[in-house]
Every structure is written in C-alpha cells, then in structure tokens.
C-alpha cells in the first residue's frame, strides 16, 4: 500500500500531491488535469510549452495561474517569468492573476524537477476541482 491511499481522489490537493511526489510516495493520478485541450511538449532542452483550455464557466473570470515544481523535498513556485520562490507552507504562490482565457505558456525545465501547472478562480477552486497537472517530465 503506497502513501497515496491516505489521500482519496475526492480530497487530494495539489499540496498533498506535490509533497507526495516530492518524497516519491506516489505518481500523478490519472484523473488530474481535466482541463480542455491540454497539451505539453518539450520545445527545447530547457523549455516546455504548455497549452490548456479554460472551462467555459471560467472563461473571462478573474483567476490565477499556478506553476510549481518538486524535486526531492524541495517545492518551488514560479511567481513571474523570472522569479521562483520556495514553498513550505501557507497559500500557494501565484504566477499570474487576470481574466482566464485559453492560453499557451512556456516554462523552464530545471534539471529533474517535476513541473506542474494549474489554474483556478482561487487556490481552493483549483485544488477542489482538480484544475492542475504534471507538465514535465512530459506525461
């Protein structure tokens, strides 16, 4: 029995997922990232292009984009195109805030860091509605 059994699908959060992935307790569940038109592809040795659609009910509403990564016991979040921050507790750091629209973003590849992208009207919306997923290594 792996440690993921302690986090049923209905209550698993990105925080638990990142922490579990960081310690190697589990892999990304197959139900994560139910975002329309999701695609990630490595476009160079140091970049991944991520394209995702926003749910019709969320299009145009103000929300947040989150970009995070985990490696070992380290969890990081990108907070601007050039800024990363370590995360240990509290609210997840936001990459950008604004009207939610279908988009393509390019994120850096940082060694063997597992990268995740998500969006939501707020953190709870992203976590509770599973609007996130692993983008690197490219699934």
Image (cartoon, rainbow, N blue to C red):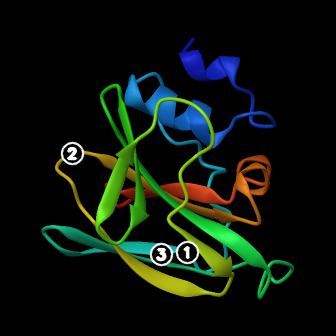
Whole-Å distance between the Cαs marked 2 and 3?
Answer: 20 Å
Q: Which mark is residue 39?
A: 3
Whole-Å distance between the Cαs marked 1 and 3?
Answer: 4 Å
Q: Closest to the observer: 80 or 118?
A: 80
Q: Is residue 106 left or right of residue 112?
A: right
User: Residue 131 at x, y = what percent?
Assistant: 68, 60
Contact, mark 1 vs mark 3 (Cβ under 8 Å): yes
Name the mark nearer the viewer: 1 or 2.
2
Crowding near the residue tagged with mark 1, few <14, some 14–19, many ≥20 C-alpha atoms within 10 Å: some
Q: Classify 45 as above or below 8.
A: below
Name the mark nearer the viewer: 2 or 3.
2
Q: Residue at x 60, y 31 (%)?
A: 16
Crowding near the residue tagged with mark 3, few <14, some 14–19, many ≥20 C-alpha atoms within 10 Å: some
Disc 3 element: strand
Q: Classify 32 as above or below 29.
A: below
Q: Closest to the observer: 138 or 87?
A: 87
Q: Classify 78 as above or below 8.
A: below
Name the residue beneath numbered marker 2: 112
Name the residue beneath numbered marker 1: 38
N-terminal of the two: label 2 or label 3?
Answer: 3
Disc 2 element: loop
Q: Quadrant of residue 41?
A: bottom left
């Amino acid at each position: 029995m792996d440690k993921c059994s302690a986090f049923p699908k209905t209550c698993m959060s990105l925080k638990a997922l990142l922490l579990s992935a960081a310690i190697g307790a589990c892999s990304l569940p197959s139900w994560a990232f139910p975002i329309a038109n999701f695609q990630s592809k490595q476009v160079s040795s140091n970049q991944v292009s991520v394209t995702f659609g926003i749910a019709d009910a969320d299009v145009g509403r103000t929300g947040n984009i989150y970009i995070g990564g985990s490696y070992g016991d380290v969890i990081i979040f990108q907070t601007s195109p050039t800024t990363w921050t370590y995360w240990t507790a509290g609210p997840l750091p936001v990459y950008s805030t604004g009207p939610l629209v279908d988009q393509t973003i390019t994120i850096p590849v940082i060694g063997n860091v597992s990268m995740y992208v998500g969006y939501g009207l707020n953190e709870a919306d992203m976590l509770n509605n599973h609007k996130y997923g692993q983008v690197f290594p490219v699934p």
